[in-house]
Amino acid sequence: MERNDAVMPWVAIVCAAIMWIILLFLFNKETAPEPVVVDPAVVASINKEWPVLGNKVFHVTAGCAGCHGAEGQGGAGPKLAGDEKILKDPVYVHTIITKGKGGMPAFGDKLKEEEIYAVANYVLHSWGNKIEEPLTPATVAAGQTKVDPAVLKNRSRFVPEDIHLPEIFLATFVMVLLTYGLIGLYSVWAEGQELHPGIHKVRSTPLSNLAMVVTLGLSLLFSTLFVRQMVTDYAAWGNKEMPNVAMEGFFAAMILFTIAAAIALYKKFYMDGEVLVEDASGEFPW
């Protein structure tokens, strides 16, 4: 008897994809950088003021030296001397100063605008650091057209820092639909389009044997990479560096995915099945 519920998993997955697109727009709105107002007076004074004012803010006003070291050598905070990352993206320095990051507080409301640009330029022109042109509001405004590294890192968690009830509801519904759809597709794939009472004998093929070996091999590979990444990140914590949590999550997800694929292959090609009741009227494939 042909099953009439084989199409429902695809409907669930399509609906989940549409809701996921809506979620991405919501998250993008949450993590979008705020526009910067360019003040010509500030631009004119930056080149003149940053060497003295920036030094004062770094060592006295904001006390940056207490965490980053008087010579940018690092301490409680990251090392700033000879930092290629901030030289490639000077706007990132402005973002971190104004919005904070990790244990570093935000100084957007504590420092004046000219002080923020002065200390940013002081960092970008000291201890071996050197950028071609001083950081100005115009540079920051131009950088807003690019994806800020802080925003990218935020999006890598798949959710913004503060998630609200509508996003929670949509994310939960997406997961329910995906779970239903994937289990349904697996059920149709493993059991076929037709269900008949009785014992169903299965036989493995050379291709299924190869798929099983590859899947188990990948599971072992990702397990090894996961353990290696955990060891690396543990050392990073000891050095007060940010661990690569996203990579840990990727390896863990791939372990689960490959194990699930191995189980699916086992049920499809290696395990006999039995249909006790011939019923094609249900809406839930499993």
Image: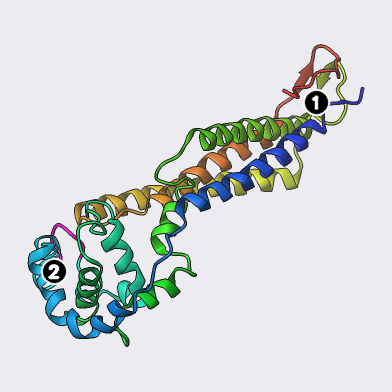
Mark 1 or mark 2, earlier in chain: 2
Majority secondary structure in the magenta region: loop
Q: Is residue 86 left or right of residue 77?
A: right
Could you tell me which residue is drawn at 68 percent across and 44 percent down? 18
Which picture quadrant has residue 15? top right
Could you tell me which residue is drawn at 48 percent across and 69 percent down? 146
Secondary structure, mark 1, is loop
Residue marked by disc 2: 58
Q: Tell us which disc is closer to us: 1 or 2.
A: 2
Q: Nearer the viewer, residue 148 or 274?
A: 148
Which picture quadrant has residue 17? top right
Give, as a single range, the part of the protein colored magenta: 73-78
Q: Is residue 217 visible?
A: no
Amino acid bearing label 1: Lys
The quadrant the N terminus occupies is top right
Give how far across and how far down residue 28 sits, in percent: 52, 53
* Label at residue 201: 1
Secondary structure, mark 2, is helix
Could you tell me which residue is drawn at 36 percent across and 54 percent down? 244
Q: Is residue 248 visible?
A: yes
Q: Is residue 260 left or right of residue 1?
A: left
